[in-house]
Image (cartoon, helix red, strand yellow):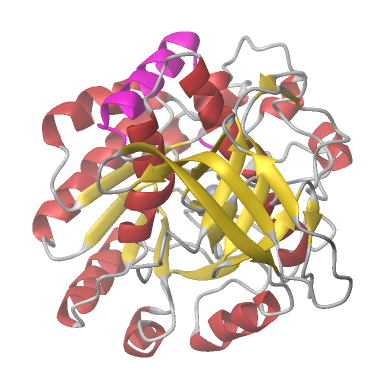
Amino acid sequence: MVIFSNLRVWDIQKREFVKRDLDFQKDETTIKTSDTKIDASELIAIPPLVDIHVHFREPGYEYKENILSGSEAAFSSGIFTVLDMPNTNPITDSVATILQKKELAQRQNYVHVLVASALTEKNFSNLEEIEKHADAYKVFMSESFGNLSISYETLEKSLAKLEDLESRKPIFFHAEDPEILEQSKSYSSHNRRRPPEAEASAIQQVLSWALDFPELKFHITHISSGLSLRILEISKHENVTLDTCPRYIYLNQTSEIEEKLKQVNPPLRNSIDSAMLLKSLATGLIDMVSSDHSPHTLEEKLEKSVSGMPGVQELVPSILSLINKMEIEWDRVIESLYEFPSALLNLPKIDLSQNMIVLNMSDPIEITKNWVKSKANWSPFENQMFVGQMLYAVKEGKIVFENGNYLNRK
Ligand SMILES: [Zn+2]
């Protein structure tokens, strides 16, 4: 048993911390350890968190990451649920590929893995069946060829179909306008080939679909630029939600990181964009945060020009650190990493007295390669100091994680 005294626990109704004495059994199947008494007056407990955008690369790219390694990285920082994106091999765009990924996810018990299906040119005719199994949808607006592509014409038919089916599954948009990317492709630098105008234009397109299909849930993910925020400030509809990622808040084109490691879509912008994104997250124009954990090995990043960076393990501590810097309030952190993602993904209500994570908000965490659990084995946040180490995790009334050790690994 673990006995906490004077633990400050987030009260979801009161929207503040309240002091509690709590005790939980440990979830130990083999070794029984003795009771632990903890003076928890310096610790806090909050709901288990959700990452609405990860690429765990399985099936197909297991050398970059797999569901086990990605899930362990997510769980170690307090995330109990993730939404995995469909650009695996095979692409997740059918009942069979959704079920295959869900079965792969059963081999670990760190996190609950939800599965997004791509909306593509070819799966339009199977949406009725896909709707029964997908947890969300993903639209890659900027993929103008290949298996992930969808024409606006087919997409509009797919949206109409989903509205007929009364779908409440969120539709995620990677918003970059393929025409603007095409016009910009001769520039030599990656960020000039993918200018903020491409994101802004695509967002305007999504907003117009959101007006046309008022019953559907539109989610614009990984917003990167201040220009997009200017548009959203005046025209974000009720059925549209937004997220940004810590990389756009903490990093920009001038950050002292190897140029090739910075490459990501949409690209890192400048420090003014970062400041606007942080402010919009703090005030709630941006509803949520996600990691867009998109790992590649260091060799791939340095030798080929591949876009994407890891971040699932950094998501929670990077955002919690903003609290200590007085950049954001607890209320918004709980909303953006728990309440709004749970609502977006239609997660069943959980008993928060039996499910929580216990965090240390004072001791610094230095981000190093050694700290990273992802198979990518590097972090764009290396040398940053964060806070918010998870010391305990309580799942369904039992302690499943204690000081770095998972007690009931599958
Ligand atoms: Zn992504």
- Would residue 396 be visible to someone looking at this image? yes
For the image, the number of numbered tags is 0
Horizontal relation, residue 67 to residue 241: left or right:
right
- Between residues 226 and 344, which one lies in front from this camera angle? 344
- Place of residue 397 in the rendered image (x, y in percent of width and height, measured from the top left): 55, 68
Residue 333's image quarter?
top left
Is 217 included in the stretch rendered in magenta?
A: no
Q: What stretch is highlighted in magenta?
A: 265-286
Depicted 206 relative to depicted 149: above or below: above
Depicted 338 relative to depicted 111: above or below: above
Horizontal relation, residue 139 to residue 110: left or right:
left
- What is the quadrant of the C terminus in the image? bottom right
- Place of residue 342 in the rendered image (x, y in percent of width and height, measured from the top left): 37, 59
- Place of residue 151 in the rendered image (x, y in percent of width and height, measured from the top left): 35, 62
Residue drawn at the location 48% of the way across and 10% of the way down: 271
Is 280 included in the stretch rendered in magenta?
A: yes
Depicted 48 relative to depicted 317: above or below: below
- Place of residue 160 in the rendered image (x, y in percent of width and height, measured from the top left): 18, 73
- Would residue 308 be visible to someone looking at this image? no
- What is the quadrant of the N terminus in the image? bottom right
Horizontal relation, residue 168 to residue 66: left or right:
left
Residue drawn at the location 37% of the way across and 63% of the way down: 345
- Between residues 329 and 106, which one lies in front from this camera angle? 329
Residue drawn at the location 56% of the way across and 45% of the way down: 292
